[in-house]
Amino acid sequence: KNEVEQSPQNLTAQEGEFITINCSYSVGISALHWLQQHPGGGIVSLFMLSSGKKKHGRLIATINIQEKHSSLHITASHPRDSAVYICAVNLQGAQKLVFGQGTRLTINP
Amino acid sequence: DAGVTQSPTHLIKTRGQQVTLRCSPKSGHDTVSWYQQALGQGPQFIFQYYEEEERQRGNFPDRFSGHQFPNYSSELNVNALLLGDSALYLCASSLVLAGAMNTEAFFGQGTRLTVV
C-alpha cells in the first residue's frame, strides 16, 4: 500500500462545477503539499500546509492531521484548471517528498 | 527572479551511455532534490543535496550520482543507461530555515530523457 493515496485517479467535470480531490496518508508527516502538473511536465506548487486551511483564489486546501487526510477544492472550475493534481508529504524526520499517484482532472467547457 | 531552471529540456541517449542533467535552484535556495517520474506515475525521490553533500537518498542504484556546486546548482549523472531510465527528471529547490528543510519546494520544468 502506498504511503500517500489520492482519489479519484481521474475526474471529469463540466465548467463551473465544484471540484474535490482527496489525499490520505498513512505515516507521520511534517507538511503536506498540493502540486499541479500540466502536460509537458512542469510542476507548480499550489499549497504547503501543516494544519488547518489555506485559500488562494478559487483553490482551497484543508488538512486534518488527526485523520491523516487532506482535500483540495476548486470552486467555479474552468477548462484551464485541467491538469494532474498531486499530493505530496514531507515524512517526519526525512527530507524527501513522498508523492501520491496524482489525480487527472479534465474540465469540459 | 528566475525560478528553478533545468537543462536540457529533452534528451535522447542510447543504452549504455552516460548522461548529465543540470539544475539551477531558485534564487536564494540552497537545497536541491532530484526526482524521477515515469510515464503515468508520481515522482520518486532520487536524492537531495545540501551544503554540497548528499543528505538523503532514495531507492536508486549507484548508477545514479550527483553533485552540488558552491553556487548551489546541481548535476544528476546516470551511468550505463537502461531503457527503464526513460523518464521525466525533476529538480526541486528549497531553503533550509532554522535547520528545518520542510519549506516550500519549487520545481523546474524537468528534463525528459529517452533511452533507446
Image (tube, coloured by chain):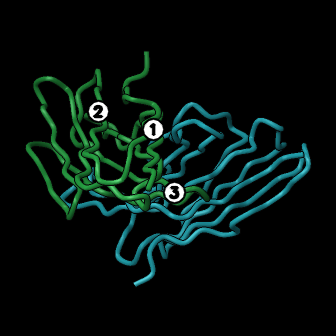
Task: Tell me where residue B63 appears, x and y as whole percent.
Answer: 73, 41
Counting residues from the start of the chain, the first of labels 2 and 1 encountered is 2
Per the image, label 2 sits on a secondary structure element best described as strand
Q: Colour of chain B?
A: cyan
**Residue B84 relative to residue A70: left or right:** right
What's the residue at 21%, 29% (across, down)?
Answer: A69
Which amino acid lies under the numbered mark 1 shown in the image of this protein?
Gly
Q: Chain of mark 2?
A: A
Q: Chain of mark 1?
A: A
The residue wearing badge 1 is A102
The residue wearing badge 3 is A38
- Residues indicated by labels 3 and 1 sit on the same polypeptide chain: yes
Q: Quadrant of the C terminus of chain A?
A: bottom left
Counting residues from the start of the chain, the first of labels 3 and 2 encountered is 2
Instruction: Estimate the spatial distance between the alpha carbons at disc 3 and disc 2, rounded to whole Å.
Output: 19 Å
Per the image, label 1 sits on a secondary structure element best described as loop
Q: Nearer the viewer, residue B65 or A98?
A: A98
The relative height of residue A25 versus residue A21 in the rendered view (above or below) is above
**Residue A18 relative to residue B20: left or right:** left
Label 2 Cα crowd, 10 Å radius (few <14 / some 14-19 / many 20+) = some
Task: Tell me where residue A67 appears, x and y as whole percent.
Answer: 14, 23
The relative height of residue B103 versus residue A10 in the rendered view (above or below) is below
Q: Nearer the viewer, residue A62 or B92?
A: A62
Q: Colour of chain A?
A: green
Task: Tell me where residue B67 appears, x and y as whole percent.
Answer: 59, 59
Task: Tell me where residue B76 appears, x and y as whole percent.
Answer: 64, 56
Counting residues from the start of the chain, the first of labels 3 and 1 encountered is 3
**Which circle marks residue A22 in the picture?**
2
